[in-house]
Image (cartoon, rainbow, N blue to C red):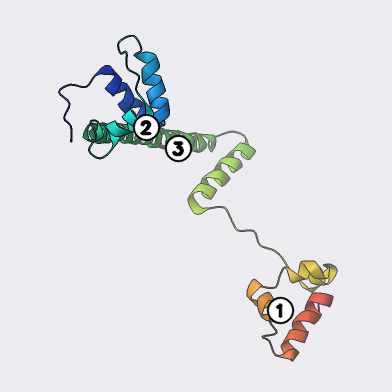
Amino acid sequence: MAKLKHITKYHERALELKYKGYSYQNIAEDINRKFEKSRKAKFTEQSIKDWFKESGTLCETYRLYAQELDAFHQETVDIIRKAGVRVREQNFRLANEMLVALMGSQNDGVKLAAIKELLDRVEGHPKETLQLNKINFKEMNPSDRWDFIPYEMQLALARNQYPDAKAEIIKKWVDTGE
């Protein structure tokens, strides 16, 4: 691999643009535009490719450059993530303290809402219960009753996997609700 005694400004620019995902053609055009006064010869797409190929002038330099920037970006993301967690925790504590304070309100409606919110956070929202009886099923249309049949049973019915008598009972219930 060719070793560089020093990295020129156009090499630095090439490293930066490659890391940002520019194509070799775009890198060559950018460098030629930026450094046209300092160089008479123009860089071609192939010369830029040669810099970054396995035995190229910038291959090892680019690998180290990319590693360093990747580590820096990861560190930045970690800092931001930790700051976000800290902000969420502080706001969560503040919200809970405010709910507790609202429980001391003179208004019973405010007290009840604060208590309900705290209980929902600690215990979870209560599950909805459906009161189903034969009257409700009889009043439904058959397609709505069909939705109450578990998917596995629907498949078994479609594949004729039930004995005829059992299949008829299920179909009658879907049709009539009885």
**Residue 177 visible in the picture:** no
Q: Is residue 82 left or right of residue 143?
A: left
For the residue carrying disc 2, how many other residues have a C-alpha within 10 Å: few (<14), some (14-19), or many (20+)? Answer: few
Q: Residue furthest front?
A: 41
Which residue bears the numbered disc 1? 158
What residue is shown at x 40% (from left), y 34% (from top)? 84
Q: Is residue 75 above or below residue 178?
A: above
Q: Position of residue 13 (x, y in %)?
A: 32, 22
Q: Position of residue 53 (x, y in %)?
A: 28, 37
- Mark 2 lies on a secondary structure that is helix
Which of the image's four quarters has the N terminus? top left
Nearer-the-camera pick, 127 or 7: 7
Is label 1 in contact with label 2 (beta carbons under 8 Å)? Answer: no
- Distance, label 1 to label 3, CA atoms, is 50 Å
Nearer-the-camera pick, 144 or 111: 144
What residue is shown at x 70% (from left), y 80% (from top)? 157
- Mark 1 lies on a secondary structure that is helix
Which is more N-terminal, label 2 or label 3?
A: 2
**Residue type highlighted by circle 3:** Phe
Which residue bears the numbered disc 3? 92
Q: Is residue 128 left or right of residue 175?
A: left
Nearer-the-camera pick, 127 or 25: 25
Residue 19, quarter of picture: top left
Which residue bears the numbered disc 2? 80
Task: Count how many numbered circles sit on residues in the image.
Answer: 3
- Distance, label 3 to label 2, CA atoms, is 18 Å
Residue 20, quarter of picture: top left
Which is more N-terminal, label 3 or label 1?
A: 3
- Mark 3 lies on a secondary structure that is helix
